[in-house]
């Protein structure tokens, strides 16, 4: 699998029934963490096997690789923090997923939301609609979202799916140095 491949938007990822099923599992979950500094809530939840297999199939077809789903997590972005009645802004600066030791294929799925908040991957902007996903390599492509203020009633619900290639090996020791240098370049653009 190449980690610099063209990013792909996938339409109509799940059926209405599947979306309702996933959202029910998310709402029932007790594993919730509020990350106020990022204006996000993270939730670990049960994902039915049929839906896992559907997501895996999309990703294997796009990457032309046998993949293993290693992690997934729900994330809700909204205005958790307000100062002096000014809407809060989620803080997603240019970064790469540096917590993984092996390369990852990422399936960023927008399950629900009422605001357009583009994802930028290596300088290219992608705007998702509900029930669309974007593929990229979180470990090999710098990604972020532009600065935006969420009003009290605005939110964006994402599920991040991370995969490894069945033949995957750990990233090299110099990978983190290379990615940190690349991140700094994009971060300068982000700040300006």
Image: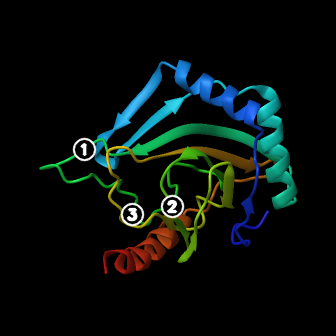
Please give left or right for residue 118 compared with residue 3 in the image.
left
**Is residue 30 at least partly visible in the picture?**
yes
Q: Are marks 1 and 3 in contact (CB under 8 Å)?
A: no
What is the distance, in whole Å, between disc 3 and disc 2 at their CAs? 10 Å
Please give left or right for residue 141 compared with residue 154 in the image.
right
Q: Which residue is mark 3?
A: 93
Q: Which residue is mark 2?
A: 96
Residue closest to the far left? 84
Q: Which residue is mark 1?
A: 81
Depth-wise, is mark 2 or mark 1 nearer the camera?
1
Image quarter of the N terminus: bottom right
Q: Position of residue 68 (x, y in %)?
A: 77, 42
Q: Secondary structure at mark 3?
A: loop
The foreground one among 173 and 134 is 134
| N-term mark: 1 or 3 | 1
The foreground one among 45 and 127 is 127
Q: Looking at the image, is 86 positioned above or below residue 81?
A: below
Depth-wise, is mark 3 or mark 2 nearer the camera?
3
Q: Position of residue 29 (x, y in %)?
A: 53, 20
């Amino acid at each position: 699998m190449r980690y610099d491949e063209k990013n792909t938007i996938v339409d109509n990822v799940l059926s209405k029934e599947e979306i309702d099923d996933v959202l029910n599992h998310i709402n029932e979950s007790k594993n919730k963490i509020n990350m106020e500094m990022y204006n996000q809530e993270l939730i670990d939840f049960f994902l039915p096997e049929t839906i896992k297999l559907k997501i895996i199939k999309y990703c294997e077809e796009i990457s032309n690789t046998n993949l293993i789903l290693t992690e997934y997590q729900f994330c809700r972005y909204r205005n958790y923090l307000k100062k002096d009645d000014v809407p809060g802004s989620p803080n997603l600066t240019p970064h790469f997923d540096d917590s993984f030791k092996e390369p990852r294929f990422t399936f960023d799925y927008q399950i629900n939301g009422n605001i357009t908040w583009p994802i930028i991957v290596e300088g290219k902007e992608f705007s998702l609609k509900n029930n669309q996903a974007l593929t990229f390599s979180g470990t090999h492509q710098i990604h972020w979202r532009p600065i935006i203020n969420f009003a009290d009633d605005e939110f964006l619900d994402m599920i991040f799916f991370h995969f490894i290639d069945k033949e995957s090996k750990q990233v090299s020791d110099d990978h983190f140095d290379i990615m940190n240098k690349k991140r700094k370049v994009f971060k300068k653009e982000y700040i300006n």
